[in-house]
Amino acid sequence: MIRLVLSVLAFLALAAWWPGWHQAEQPLGQAVDPAAFVAQTEAFAARYQRGERVEAPAGEVPLLARKFEFWPDVKLQPDHSYRLRIMAQDSVHSVAVNGVELLLVPGFVQDIDVSPGDQLELRCNEYCGLGHNRMRLKLY
Ligand SMILES: [Cu+2]
């Protein structure tokens, strides 16, 4: 009997210790009203559109990840810092930049702070369809 108890305890101890069992769920970011965030991003893009690109003033920049682009096509000023606020619009994507990768899910906004000198090409690392490989955005 004692052996059975000990082996059950050993099993439970191993299970508790085993990597992955207690891994925190990947944070999804801040829950938002998706339609409101899309509207906010569209308003931002319309306001700062300069020719082909959107020239963002320093501060917060809302972005949408969707098949197969990060939108709008923002151009950051090289001597300013920004907080990118990104939400997936149509399906699950991800954003990888500067060695950080965040999962993007519709309805949740992920924040990424970027500074001058960072290597700033956003890319999606979550396969999202045939145009997935094109899903990149150079920010500066
Ligand atoms: Cu993708």
Image: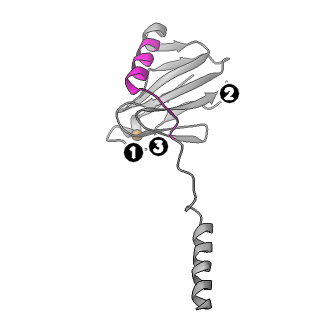
What amino acid is found at the position of numbered circle 2 in the picture? Gly
Q: Residue at x 44, y 17 (%)?
A: 40
Q: Which residue is mark 2?
A: 117
Of badges 1 and 2, the one in the foreground is 1
Of badges 3 and 2, the one in the foreground is 3
Asked which secondary structure carries label 2, the reply is loop
Q: Is residue 15 left or right of residue 90?
A: right
- Count the marks: how many? 3
Q: CA distance from mark 3 to mark 2?
A: 22 Å
Q: CA distance from mark 1 to mark 2?
A: 28 Å
Q: Is residue 30 magenta?
A: yes
Residue 56 sits above or below residue 96 on the image: above
Q: Quadrant of the C terminus?
A: top right
Asked which secondary structure carries label 1, the reply is loop
Q: Which residue is mark 1?
A: 127
Q: Position of residue 83 (x, y in %)?
A: 60, 24
Crowd around label 2: few <14 · some 14–19 · many ≥20 (10 Å): few
- Badge 3 residue CB within 8 Å of ligand 1: yes
Quarter location, residue 41: top left
Residue 44 sits above or below residue 100 on the image: above
Q: Does any portion of residue 52 appear in the rendered image?
A: no
- Badge 1 residue CB within 8 Å of ligand 1: yes
Q: Which residue is mark 3?
A: 125
Asked which secondary structure carries label 3, the reply is loop
Q: Position of residue 32 (x, y in %)?
A: 46, 28
The front one of 92 and 130 is 92
Q: CA distance from mark 3 to mark 1?
A: 6 Å
Where does ligand 1 appear, by image quarter?
Answer: top left
> Over which residues does the magenta segment extend?
28-44
